[in-house]
Image (tube, rainbow, N blue to C red):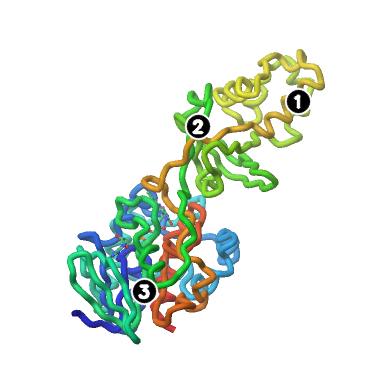
Amino acid sequence: MALSELIIIGAGPAGLAAGIAAKVPAIILERNPFAGKKLLLSGKGQCNFTNAIAPEEFLQRLGEYKNFLKPAFYHFDNQAFIDLLEANACATFIREDSKVFPQSLQSSEVRDTLLKILHKAGQSVEYDTRVSEITKEGDYFILSTADKRQYRCKKLILAGGGAAYASTGSDGNCYQLAAKLGHTIIPSRPALTNITVKNFGAFQYCAGISLKGAELRLGKRRYSGDLLFTHQGLSGPLILDNSHLFQPDVTIQISFIQSNLLTLSTEHKARKLSSYLQTKGIPKAVALALLSHISAPDKALHEYKHKDMRRICESLQQVPFTVRSLGGEGIAMGDYGGICLKEVKAGTMESKLIKGLYFAGELLAYTLPTGGFSIQMAVSTGMLAALLK
Ligand SMILES: Cc1cc2nc3c(=O)[nH]c(=O)nc-3n(C[C@H](O)[C@H](O)[C@H](O)COP(=O)(O)OP(=O)(O)OC[C@H]3O[C@@H](n4cnc5c(N)ncnc54)[C@H](O)[C@@H]3O)c2cc1C
């Protein structure tokens, strides 16, 4: 049986960060034959590893998880991550939209740099090692692997990822390991995923078109962001960031215009409505699909009665789309669910239930928006957990 002061399960960004920050010799156990399989896929292989917005704004973007994640972010924030990579010869750049990437636009460079720093710190990863059981005996955790090896440690960091994109090795199995130790698991469902829509009709001809600043209405809640049409449904940050709130058969409403947009001026009276909508930033294919979807005729503006125009205006502010399906956890970029945050100390990442057990990264029950927030917080929580406070 191998003995180590600290064992870290998972060599994704959270586990690698924990290994880098650990002050004691650690063993990182990774089920795959290489590290960071999900990290390599991130940002379409380009790795949007953090976001350069100011710290206060960054925290706001963490939404309802802000308070839980604040200590981890303050411990190792976005600038600290950029600095760490830069100091280790991984040049980075900030895109116009504040997303940060390696200058090479190769996610492998971020992964390899983290590994290089880890090795410099004298730590290493044992690959092809899937932990299948964890028990606690006295002060020690006993870990059994799928190929019947055993490890023993006093401190354990669970950084095995969530349940999304199972082909990467993060298939939710660590939820079960934590549940067996007594932790509550918030049931997982897909997040950060696109949707297919019932009766998509003429919108199928809009595939590839994106619209800035559309507004999603879900009951009384409103969210705004960029919307992308796909062949069978909707995507873009507006949909991805809120997809954990959707379910099949639920009808969501999207507003395509602001309330004052259809104040008609005389110069536009001869224009057709679809053409007028184009002057308001709605591409022609989308304008035509919208009018067909809300059963409105496409006439010259002066041909509409005032009350008809008001009805059309109202309809364009609440265009209904009924969800057919969400990209399942096999393809979703994240999942909603995981280790219940109420059972984890935000200031240390230690379990409130089991002494010596720590958590880091996406297996915690937080769901963050697109834009580099997930990788940043995996690294931040990993760095904090490794203090073993
Ligand atoms: C397609 C895609 C694109 C994405 N793009 C972005 C992006 O651009 N920016 C961003 O911020 N986020 C992005 N994300 C999300 C981001 O990749 C994750 O949030 C991040 O990788 C989570 O890090 P983690 O270390 O917590 O978990 P993971 O990266 O999932 O790592 C967990 C590791 O644990 C290992 N493991 C699991 N169980 C065991 C076990 N029992 N024994 C041993 N090892 C185990 C897994 O094999 C895995 O290597 C993307 C995700 C996907 C799927």
Mark 3 close to ligand 1, CB under 8 Å: no
Q: Secondary structure at mark 2?
A: loop
The disc, 2 or 3, on the residue closer to the chain's N-terminal end is 3
In the image, which disc is placed on residue 157?
A: 3
Instruction: Indicate left or right for 303 with 344 as reference.
Output: right
> In the rendered view, would you say 103 is above or below 76?
above
Report the quarter where the N terminus lies.
bottom left
Q: Position of residue 188 (x, y in %)?
A: 46, 54
Q: Residues within 10 Å of mark 1 (few under 14, many from 20)?
A: few
> In the rendered view, would you say 66 is above or below 7?
above
The residue under label 2 is: 209
Q: Position of residue 10 (x, y in %)?
A: 31, 66
Mark-to-mark CA distance, 2 and 1: 26 Å
Asked whether 102 or 161 is in front, the reply is 161
Question: Mark 2–mark 1 contact, CB under 8 Å?
Answer: no
Image quadrant in which you'd find residue 120: bottom left
The disc, 3 or 1, on the residue closer to the chain's N-terminal end is 3
